[in-house]
Image (spheres, grey):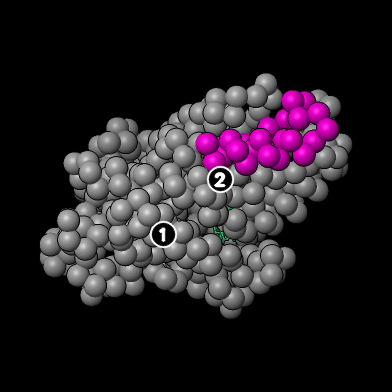
Amino acid sequence: MGRVGVLLLNLGGPDRLEDVRPFLFNLFADPEIIRLPFPWLQKPLAWWISTVRTKRSQENYKQIGGSSPLRRITEAQAQALQARLEEKGQPTQMYIGMRYWHPFTEEAIARIKRDGIDRLVILPLYPQFSISTSGSSFRLLQQMWLEDPKLNSIEYTVIPSWYKQPGYLQAMAQLIAQELDGFSNPDAVHVFFSAHGVPKSYVEEAGDPYQQEIEECTALIMQTLNRPNSYTLAYQSRVGPVEWLQPYTEDAIQELGQQGVQDMVVVPISFVSEHIETLQEIDMEYREVAESVGIHNFRRVPALNTHTQFIDGMADLTIEALNSPSVKLSQVSQMKKRVKMYPQERWQWGMTTSAEIWNGRIAMLGFIALIIELITGKGLLHAVGIL
Ligand SMILES: C=CC1=C(C)c2cc3[nH]c(cc4nc(cc5[nH]c(cc1n2)c(C)c5CCC(=O)O)C(CCC(=O)O)=C4C)c(C)c3C=C
Ligand SMILES: [Fe+2]
Ligand SMILES: [Fe+2]
């Protein structure tokens, strides 16, 4: 089979407080995160948003020790996966490609070339597909393949999403069960799934299958858990002025508190590592919201990190991918059926309707915000919550 590599894709996070600003710049410079009709506006707007958001974001990172744990955890996951694959008789070389911070995807690809990898499995560490996460990384890789003909000698396959993987579902159910069993009346605890949100237009206009995959995944985890608990699914971490997927986590917690729920277990569902949005947003901000509405027993299920069953599931997934017909980067959008994955490409050819309208709105907002800020010295986006 030649030399086999596994490329783990992830988001990346600042290693120090000084990294927050350039990290945010990279994030907002990604057209899959903020989509603009004019490519030339992308970098100035990213510069502006990252500049004004840095302080608030740094405050949050300070509360979790001044850095993101993502790199450390992803490296531990890579090591554990490599060891498990070796045990299963499949030796591999592991690579980590982060989208917005070190080690960047470009660095990983350079190493893959240097090491002479013959076969490569591209495995995003996001269980569910979203245009804004796995989609963005796939798009970057697709560009790299286009620009570097040497990469064509690598026989690669992509795993677009894997939220139905049995080892993953069992590991999630096991972690939830363990948390529930810490309560005096486990069956009466409300299980609260909190997924990272995306703007509603991603789903409704761009065809992002993210919401559908999150809903299906939640139902599958509850089925695997096989307990009588009631449960809710809500979306957290909204950024900016537009509508995101609903219900919002904060509102849903308040509503449940008002309905008399006192015991709650929060399950972060769209990401497999601890990160700022579990450690700071859920453990600190949402805990405070819960306490203010009488949810006195508020606990959170830990992220999977290097959970044995989860890593075992990832090893099975990798071996399965190596033994199946390969999936190319260009096939992902067709596999996801409705996804018009890269809408900004279409404006250049004048072919879109809805994406164009949506992006026009965003651009207009950006322009108005810039002008208001220049005139008043106060940011509009601050007022509406992006900064
Ligand atoms: C599957 C998970 C995630 C989705 C979907 C997602 C979409 C998305 N995110 C933003 C804006 C920001 N994300 C930030 C950090 C961040 N986001 C995720 C996950 C998803 N994002 C992670 C794991 C992290 C990193 C956490 C860490 O530990 O460092 C940030 C920066 C942090 C902050 O300032 O709040 C921003 C901003 C958008 C706009 C979006 C969908 C369009
Ligand atoms: Fe995010
Ligand atoms: Fe966020």
Q: Which disc is residue 351 wearing?
A: none
Residue 286: tell me if it is visible: yes
Question: Quadrant of the image for the N terminus?
Answer: bottom left
Q: Is residue 36 magenta?
A: no
Does the residue tagged 2 have its C-beta within 8 Å of any atom of ligand 1? Answer: yes
Q: Quadrant of residue 243?
A: top right
Nearer to the camera, 312 or 51: 312
Q: In the rendered view, does 199 fall on the left or right side of 206?
A: right
Residue 233 in the image, given as x and y percentages of width and height: 61, 32
Residue where numbered disc 2 is placed: 196
- Residue type at mark 2: give it: His
Describe the element under mark 2 as helix, strand or loop: strand
The region drawn magenta spans 170-194
Residue 42: tell me if it is visible: no
Q: Alpha carbon of mark 2 to alpha carbon of mark 1: how far? A: 30 Å
Q: In the rendered view, does 256 fall on the left or right side of 221?
A: right
Identify the residue at image location x=85%, y=40%: 296
Q: Relative to residue 178, is residue 272 depicted above or below? A: below
Identify the residue at image location x=30%, y=47%: 319
Nearer to the camera, 314 or 352: 314
Describe the element under mark 1 as helix, strand or loop: helix
Residue where numbered disc 1 is placed: 83
Earlier residue among tags 2 and 1: 1
Residue 40 in the image, given as x and y percentages of width and height: 35, 65
Question: Quadrant of the image for the C terminus?
Answer: bottom right
Q: In the rendered view, does 220 fall on the left or right side of 247?
A: left
